């Protein structure tokens, strides 16, 4: 259900030109895909959201997404920071 809401959020944000909400929706779509074992596809969405966040933050004066990468040693290699 959350995935459907995020798909709708991204569609509305795209249609209305709401870049900040597009970033948020894209990020959550990626997170959901990774959580549901779609790691590679999910990481692609997450990278896209983070890149858009970097661009969009200049317009707003600060980051939309702010978080720290986990430093847990048991993370799969595909999720470790490169």
Image (cartoon, grey):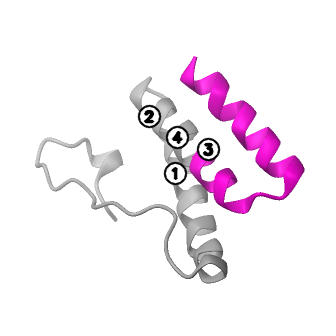
Distance, label 4 to label 2, CA atoms, is: 10 Å
Q: Does residue 13 show up magenta in the picture? A: yes
Mark 4 or mark 2, which has the lower sequence index?
Answer: 4
Q: Position of residue 43 (x, y in %)?
A: 49, 47
Dot label at residue 46: 1
Distance, label 1 to label 4, CA atoms, is: 8 Å
Closer-to-camera residue (60/48): 60
Q: Name the residue under label 2.
A: 34
Label 4: which secondary element: helix
Q: Mark 3 points at which residue?
A: 25
Give the number of the mark in front: 2 or 3.
Answer: 3
Q: Where is residue 55 in the image (x, y as percent from the top left)?
A: 64, 76
Tag 4: Cα neighbours inside 10 Å, few (<14), some, or many (≥20)?
many
Specify the quadrant of the image occupied by residue 51.
bottom right
Mark 2 or mark 1, which has the lower sequence index?
Answer: 2
Label 3: which secondary element: helix
25 relative position to 14: left or right:
left
Mark 3 or mark 1, which has the lower sequence index?
Answer: 3
Label 2: which secondary element: helix
Q: The magenta stretch spans which residues?
A: 1-26
């Amino acid at each position: 259900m959350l995935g459907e809401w995020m798909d709708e959020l991204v569609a509305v944000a795209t249609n209305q030109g709401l870049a900040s909400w597009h970033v948020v929706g894209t990020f959550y779509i990626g997170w959901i895909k990774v959580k549901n074992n779609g790691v590679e596809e999910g990481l692609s969405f997450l990278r896209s959201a983070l890149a858009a966040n970097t661009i969009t933050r200049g317009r707003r004066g600060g980051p939309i997404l702010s978080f720290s990468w986990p430093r847990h040693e048991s993370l799969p290699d595909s999720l470790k920071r490169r």
